[in-house]
Image (tube, rainbow, N blue to C red):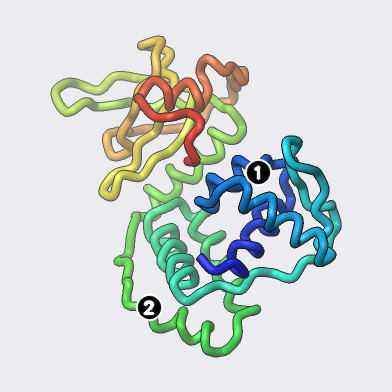
Amino acid sequence: MRRADRLFLIIHTLRGRRAITARRLAETLRVSARTVYRDVADLQLSGIPIEGAAGVGYTLRRGSDVPPLMFTRAELEALVVGARFTEAFAGERLAAAARHALVKVEAVLPDDLRRRTERSRVLVPAGRRAAARADLDALHEAIESRHLVRFAYAKADGPASRRDVEPVCLAFWGRVWTLGAWCRMRQDFRNFRLDRMSGMHVLEETYPDDPARGLRAFLASVGANPDAEV
């Protein structure tokens, strides 16, 4: 990575965040902490309003006017492809957000990079049916508002059973979406395939924000690292 790119990444990693340590920056940028200390010192000397110190953490002063980082061609194509996947396979809420984000990105690009977004050869076929998109939107909203969800669930080898669950997260596996949730019938975490759910609706009842039944606990239950970037 070029040093200029690394300096911009430091600025934008600090933007809008609480203090972040040099060690965390070093892990993100895959350089040594000493390199981060040197880069931050150089940025401060050049007038970038970075506050903090080694051993304490760094933050970018709120309200600072720092010019945006321009994308490389590979980064831009990654954004375009990611937005296309989101538009094809996510709920309408995220699909619309992806479309709007691309419009905003393209509005500030120079002509050569804007044309690059139109020439990507990574294509994404049409995705989900309208009904499936509506279910994804409803589940997404239920996770954010902590509302209980009820549905009938059919296993591959048995009859359907009614489930009341506390939804935790949604995951896309390439062919199917799954809902990670705390199942009140089983009193444990379960993964539910959306294509095996029927009669799904969000209840008025809400559930408490209990860490023992939250995202970190769910990730630990399936053998994932709760501290990893998701």
Name the side, left or right, on which 99 lies relative to 18.
left
Give the secondary structure at mark 1.
helix
Q: Residues within 10 Å of mark 2 (few under 14, many from 20)?
A: few
| Residue that protrudes farthest toward the bottom in the picture | 111
Taking the spot 46% from the left edge, 63% from the top edge, the residue there is: 83
Give the secondary structure at mark 2.
loop
Name the side, left or right, on which 71 lies relative to 185.
right
Amino acid bearing label 1:
Ala
Q: Quadrant of residue 146?
A: top right
Depth order, front residue of 132/107: 107
Q: Is residue 97 above or below residue 169?
A: below
Name the side, left or right, on which 91 lies relative to 53.
left
Q: Which residue is mark 2?
A: 120
Taking the spot 52% from the left edge, 14% from the top edge, the residue there is: 212
Q: Is residue 140 above or below residue 153?
A: below
Taking the spot 35% from the left edge, 45% from the top edge, the residue there is: 172
Q: Position of residue 57 (x, y in %)?
A: 73, 40
Task: Give the number of the disc on residue 118.
Answer: none
Depth order, front residue of 3/187: 3
Amino acid bearing label 2:
Ser
Q: Can residue 65 be seen in the rendering of this structure?
A: no
- Of labels 2 and 1, earlier in sequence is 1
Q: Is residue 54 above or below residue 216?
A: below
Q: Residues within 10 Å of mark 1 (few under 14, many from 20)?
A: many
Taking the spot 63% from the left edge, 79% from the top edge, the residue there is: 107
- Give the CA distance from mark 2 to mark 1: 36 Å
How many badges with numbers are in the image?
Answer: 2
Q: Position of residue 93 (x, y in %)?
A: 53, 53
Q: Position of residue 217 (x, y in %)?
A: 48, 20
Q: Position of residue 33 (x, y in %)?
A: 61, 45
Q: Which residue is mark 1?
A: 22
| Residue that protrudes farthest toward the left in the picture | 157
